[in-house]
Amino acid sequence: MTLLEFARGPGLQWAVTIFIVGVLWRLLGVFLLRGKRDLSEPRQPAAWKGLRLIALRSWPRREFLEGTAFGEVMGYTFHVGFLVSLFFFAPHVLFFADVARGLIGTDLRGLIGVGWPTLPNGIITLLAAVSVAALLAVLVHRLVNPVKRLISNFDDYFSWFVTVAPLVTGLAAFSHLSGWPYERLLAYHLLAVELLLVWFPFGKLMHAFTIFAARGATGMIFERKGASL
Amino acid sequence: MTAPTGHTHTRKPEPLEFDKPRVSIAKPEYRFDMQGEMPEPERVERAMKSFVKDFGRTAAIYMESCIHCGMCAEACHFYEVTKDPKYTPIWKLEPFKQAYKREYGPFAVIYRALNLKQKVTVQQLQEWQELIYDSCTVCGRCSLMCPMGIDIASLVSQARHGMFNAGLIPHELWSVTERARLEGSPLGATPKVFKDRLEWLADDHEVDIPLDKANADVLCAMSSIEIMKYPDSVVATARIMNHLGVDWTFRLDGYEATNFGLLSGNSAAQKLLTMKIIDAAVACGAKTVILPECGHAYTALRWMGANMYGQPLPFRVMHIAEYLAEQVHEGRLRLKQVKKSVTFHDPCQVVRRGGAIEAPRDVLKALGVELREMYPTKGTNWCCGGGGGVIANHRADDIRYKTFRIKMEQIEKTGAEMPVTTCANCRQTFDDGQAHFKWDTEMHSLLELVADNLVEEET
C-alpha cells in the first residue's frame, strides 16, 4: 500500500471515524449534563432570543473594537479563506461528490438537479495564500502578545498547526511544487486533513460547534434579565 | 480558626471600623486569608468538588468553548490599568479550567491517564486568590467582550464557591460574611442597631418610618452600607414611600439586603440571608419587595432569590430605581426640576448584568437634569472597581485605586456638575476614591436626589 493509498483509504476512514465519534462524545458529554431551571421571573421572554446574541457577538461592540480589531480581522480572514478553499475548490467538490455517491449512492446534482458551485482556481489559491498569511500573523501575535502568550497552551499551537497544514500542503499540491512527485504531495495534503480531523474533537477546534451553544446559552440568560448583550 | 463550613468556629469576626471613609473591619493588616485546618489535598478537593457541584450544562459549555483569544483582557479594568496579562479574565479561572479538563470534562479519562493536565495544587489556588477576589469585581464587562459568548463573570462566581469551601478567601470577606451569618448584618447593622437607627432617623428627620407591620403591600430592604454610612438613604426611602401613600414597612426579620454570601462564595450564607427577606415578605403578605441602591443585593434576590427559594417568588422584586421609574411612568411621582448637568455611573449588577438600564435614566429625565452620558456608558460602562467585595478587601486597595482613575477620567470628560449612581457600594467606592485622590467631585445617590425633589401635593 502506498502512502497515497493509505491516506485515501484506511487513513481517511479512521480519521473520519475518530472525528465523528470524538465530536459526538464531547458534545454529548456536555449536553447531557443537567440544565438548571431558572425560577426567577423573567423581565422579558427569551425562548429564541439566544439567537440574537449568536448574531451580535459576531463582531465586537464599538467600545471594544480598538483593542480587538487585529484579532477580529485576522480571525475572519483565515476562517473565510479556509472555509471557502475547503468547500468551493473544484477538486474538493468532486471529492465530496465522490464520497456522497459512495455513502448514499448519489450526489447533490442527483438529489436536487443542481451541483455544488465552485470558484476559479486562481481565487481559491489567492484565498488560501491569504489565509496562510493571516494564520502566520495570528501565530506571531500569539507569541509576542503578553496576554496571548500567557494563556496559550499546547492546544493553541497544535490546533494552529493542524489548521495551517492542510492549507500549505494543498497549495503545494496544487502548484505541483517542483521536485516533489504530485502523488506524494497529495498524500501529505490528505494526511494533513486527517490530522486535523483526528485532533478536532480533542482541542479548541471544537469551538466550531460550541460557539453557537455558548453564545446561545448566554443570550438566553441575558435576554431573560434584559441585561446588556 | 477553622474551616468555613461544617466546622466549629473558634475565632470571632474582627471588630468593625466606622470612622474611615468606608465601612470595614478594623485592623485589616492582621490577615487570615486561609481559613480552617485541613490537609492540603482536602482543600483542593473541596475547592474542586464545590466548583463543579452546581456545574450544569451551561458552565460546561463555557469551559469547552474558550479559544484563548485573550480579547477579554481588553474589557477588564484591572488589565486596562496595569497591562499585566495575569489580569486577563479567563486566566483568573485557569486552575478551575485545568481541574475541569482533568477531572470532569468529557475527555477527563484521557487527560488523567496521560497526565496531560496536572493536578491543581493548593499553592496554585492560593496564588489565584488574588485574581479571583482582589482583581475581579464580577462586573461582567468581559462577558460582553468574549467572542465565544462565555459569561466569564458567572464562572468567577462559581470559582469563588470553590475557594470558599477550600477556606481560601480574603480575610475581610470571610469575616464580614461570618458576621452577617451570626448577627444578621455584615457591617454591624444588627436588628437592634437598625431599630435604634430608625427611631433616631424618624425623630431627627420628622418622618414616619413604619416597622414590623404585620401586613403591608410593600416590604423595603436596605443595605448595611446605607444603614451605617448613608442613613439619609433610609430617610429618603421613607419619604418617598410615604409621599406615594404606599402601604409599606421595614421588618426586623428581613431588612438587610447586603449579601456577602454571594460575594464571598458562601452559598449557605447567601441562602440564609436571602431567605430572611423572602420569609419576611411572605410573612407580611408583601406584593412587592423593593431592594435598596445596592448592586449585588439586586442580583442576589431579583435573579437568584427564586432559585434559593426553590419556587417562583410570590412577590415582585424591584430595585428602587426601577420602582421610582415605574412611579414616574404611572404619574404618581412628580418631581421638581433639577437644573443641573448630571452624569450617571451604571452599577454593573443593576445595569449591565441586571437589565435595569433605562430605569435610572428615566428617573433622571423626570428630574429634568441635563444627562451627559459617559463614554462608554450603559452596558459597557466601566466598573467603579469596588464591586464583588473588592472594596471590603484592603489588600486590593492599590489596584482598586488604579482602576478608579478610569472613573475619574470618564466623569471629568463629561463636564457634568453632578455624578449620580444607584448603588451604595459604588458610592462608597467613589467616596473612598475621592478621599484618596483628594478629588473635588462627590458621588450622589439617585434615591436621595429624588427624595430631595419631591413635589408635595397642595392641600
Image (tube, rainbow, N blue to C red):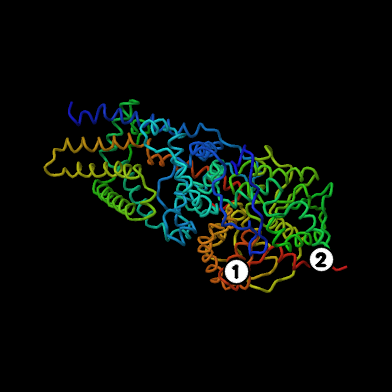
Q: Which mark is residue B204?
A: 2
Give the vertical position of B440 relative to B193 (above or below).
below
SS label for mark 2? helix
Residue B113 x/y as whole percent: 38, 30
Graded by Cα atoms within 10 Å as few (under 14), some (14 to 19) or many (20 or more), the crowding at tag 1 reads some
Residue at the (32%, 45%) spot, across then down: A157
Residue A24 x/y as whole percent: 42, 31
SS label for mark 1? helix
Type of the residue with mark 2: Asp
Q: Is residue B339 left or right of residue B91?
A: right
Residue sticking out furthest to the left: A179
Answer yes or no: are tags 2 and 1 on the same subunit. yes
What chain does mark 2 sit on? B
Relative depth, front residue between B362 and B130: B130
**Count of numbered tags:** 2
Relative depth, front residue between A67 and A208: A67
Q: Which mark is residue B28?
A: none
Graded by Cα atoms within 10 Å as few (under 14), some (14 to 19) or many (20 or more), the crowding at tag 2 reads few
Q: Is residue A1 visible?
A: yes
Residue at the (41%, 42%) spot, across then down: A207
What chain does mark 1 sit on? B
Q: Quadrant of the N terminus of chain A?
A: top left
Type of the residue with mark 1: Ala
Give the vertical position of B29 relative to B454 (above or below).
above
Residue A107 x/y as whole percent: 33, 31
Residue assigned mark 1: B435
Q: Earlier in the sequence, mark 2 or mark 1?
A: 2
Q: Kindly report the distance in space between the C-alpha atoms of the residues bearing marks 2 and 1.
A: 28 Å
